[in-house]
Image: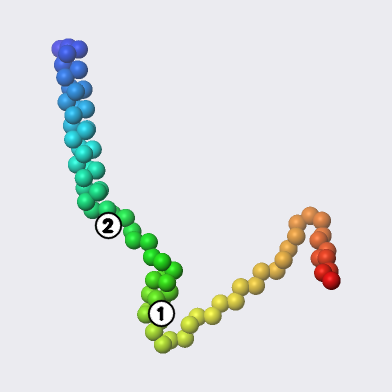
Amino acid sequence: MATAMDHRHREQANCKWNKDLAKKIAADVTQKCDTLIAKEETQEERIEKIRKTLGDKRRPVILVKIAEQHFGQRVIPKLIH
């Protein structure tokens, strides 16, 4: 039958094990942070990557046209003089 002392001893052992594991994980994360966290590219780097990929090929052209739409009362644009 387990006594209160046995239970306390197991809790202390688990606490030490958890602390040791946390230290190991922290050390690994600190040591390998360059491979664990994605490098953020600048806009210039992204553009350069696209340019290298496309080379001398034609660039895609996109036209986006969004019609203005109002809900509720109609809006009449004011003339600017």
Q: Would you say 14 lies left or right of 79 here? A: left
Q: Does residue 22 lie above or below 67 as drawn? A: above
Q: Which residue is mark 1?
A: 51
Residue found at x 75% / y 60%: 70
Marks 2 and 1 in Cβ contact (< 8 Å): no
Q: The residue under label 2 is which amino acid type?
A: Asp
**Residue drawn 21% across and 22% down?**
11
* CA neighbours of label 1 inside 10 A, class few (<14), some (14 to 19), many (20+): few
* Spot occupied by residue 10 in the image (x, y as percentages of width and height): 17, 22
Q: Which element carries disc 2, helix, strand or loop?
A: helix
Quarter of image, res 8: top left
Residue 37 versus residue 6 in the image, above or below: below
In percent of width and height, residue 56 lies at 41, 87
Residue at 27% from the left image edge and 53% from the top image edge: 33
Residue 67 as seen in the image, left or right of residue 22: right
Query: Could you tell which of marks 2 and 1 lies nearer the N-terminus?
Result: 2
Which disc is residue 34 wearing? 2
Give the colour scheme of this rendering. rainbow
Name the one closer to the observer, 29 or 58. 29
Question: Which secondary structure lies at badge 1?
Answer: helix
Task: Tell me if residue 30 comes above or below residue 71 in the rendering.
Answer: above
- Name the kind of residue labelled 1 in the image: Arg
Which residue is at the far front? Answer: 81
Q: Position of residue 55 (x, y in %)?
A: 39, 84
Residue at 48 percent across and 82 percent down: it is 59
Q: How many marks?
A: 2
Q: Give the class, few, some or many, for how many residues have Cα within 10 Å of label 2's Cα (few <14, many ≥20).
A: few
Residue 68 vs residue 78: left or right? left
Mark 2 and mark 1: span between their CA atoms? 26 Å
